Amino acid sequence: MSNRSLGRWLALVVMCALVTIPALAESHVRIVRLSDVQGPVEVDRGTGQGYEKAFLNMPMVEGMKLAAKADARAEVEFEDGSTVRIAPNTRVDFTALALQESGARVSTLTLTQGMAYVQYSGKAKSDAFTVLFKDEKVRADQAVHFRVDLEDAVAVLAVFNGDLKVEGPSGPVEVSKNKSVTFDLAAGNKFTLAKNIDEQPFDAWDKQQSKYQMAYASRGSYRDYPYQYGVSDLNYYGTYSNVPGYGMMWQPYFAGANWSPFADGAWMFYPGAGYTWVSSYPWGWMPYRYGSWNFIPGNGWMWAPGGFGGWYNVPRVTNAPQRFNPPVAPSVGTATVTVGHPGISTGVPRRLVVQNGSAGLGVPRGAINNLNKVSNQVEKNGTATVRPSAPVRTSTMPAGGFGNAGSHMGTGNAGTRMNTGAAPVSPGRVGTGGGRPSAPSHH
């Protein structure tokens, strides 16, 4: 090879390397959890079908859109325990969910309409958490809890705890605890800073959810989680036991001997990843993404934590009973396939009948105090009747749809609607699960 040819070849190699480095420096494969669904919540997964019914425990990935219609609410949990909650008539786009080569997480959310509550943990200083609305940019650099209310002509940002900086057309503005800033969107985003916060109808709901997360985040006996999303629900809805020969194993309350962890849920399709199992159980995140399920004689199904370095689309089973059929994803198509009860979204009833074999299905978050004591009653008697804690009362927000026709949420193609499966469980009774046979079973 001549010196000239060698020089050209080396130049080409260097050029290719320079083009490749940025691509390798940031991965867009992060997955976060749709951790609470109340009422008609919809998602756009980028499948070309537009907005579809959202399911509790759905994996949320970059490019997805989340919308709460009238009288609906939703929450998304991030790996570090940060949360984003949306009130009725709100839409949020997950603009970026990236992982840098250094391990730092980059999260960018765009509020396109309505009201969102953000509680950022600030645990990793290298992470970047950004919220965009109109031409404003909010970058959370430390622990902060704030609310953004976006309307047609005005936007209001209120800080409950911590402090942050907002950057926009009218320059930067710093907002600290118990203060708010109003942006006039019709006047170049001119802002006015206030030394108080005007209370909004869903502030109490947001506060209640924050209290729940903080109360149960560290109550469990197992502490070796590398992530925080789903931990509070594991600690509330179940308990760990040291099982001889297996080690620390988790099991939901009200499981029962014949309960199967795969009785209720749905298979959902994600472009580039295929079908993923989405559990209907309110605690159903970590046990289906990490670790493995084991059938322990005399105890029933229990989950062994671990395997946090990977992520399972299909739940892993390492110790199954005889004649067990493992969960199998659909081999063709992209439509959602439901199994048993595909998801239960109810308010808090005045009276709740909990039955053995329900495994927490239909029990609202934090609605029952001392769930372990109720579990003992159910184990002894097969059922228990309890009066849940009083729900947070919220005023109904004005029903204004989603702005102009261009931002209206569709229901998706009729041919790809969710299969509703069995009839939903009554708000006053927590049943024994699947009215239809589940995909996996054992006899």
Image (tube, rainbow, N blue to C red):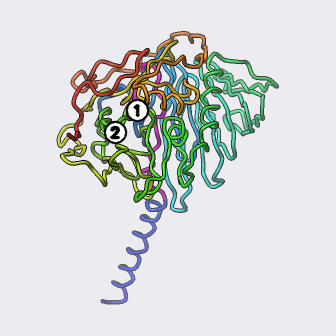
State which tag comes first along the sequence, 2 or 1.
Answer: 2
For the stretch drawn in magenta, the main secondary structure is: strand
Q: Assess disc 2: are there few (<14), some (14-19) or many (≥20) residues with their C-alpha within 10 Å of its C-alpha.
A: many
Q: Residue furthest front?
A: 380
Q: Is residue 317 left or right of residue 71?
A: left
Name above or below for residue 27 compared with residue 335.
below
Assess whether mark 1 and mark 2 are in contact (beta carbons under 8 angstroms): yes
The Cα–Cα distance between marks 2 and 1, rounded to whole angstroms, is 9 Å
Q: Residue furthest right?
A: 195
Label 1, on which residue? 359
Q: Is residue 217 left or right of residue 415?
A: right
Give amino acid for label 2.
Pro
Q: Nearer the viewer, residue 269 or 290?
A: 290
Quarter of the image for the N terminus: give it: bottom left
At horizontal 65% and vertical 31% (from top left) the residue drawn is 211
Label 2, on which residue? 261
Quarter of the image for the C terminus: give it: top left
The magenta segment is 26-46
Q: Quadrant of residue 13?
A: bottom left
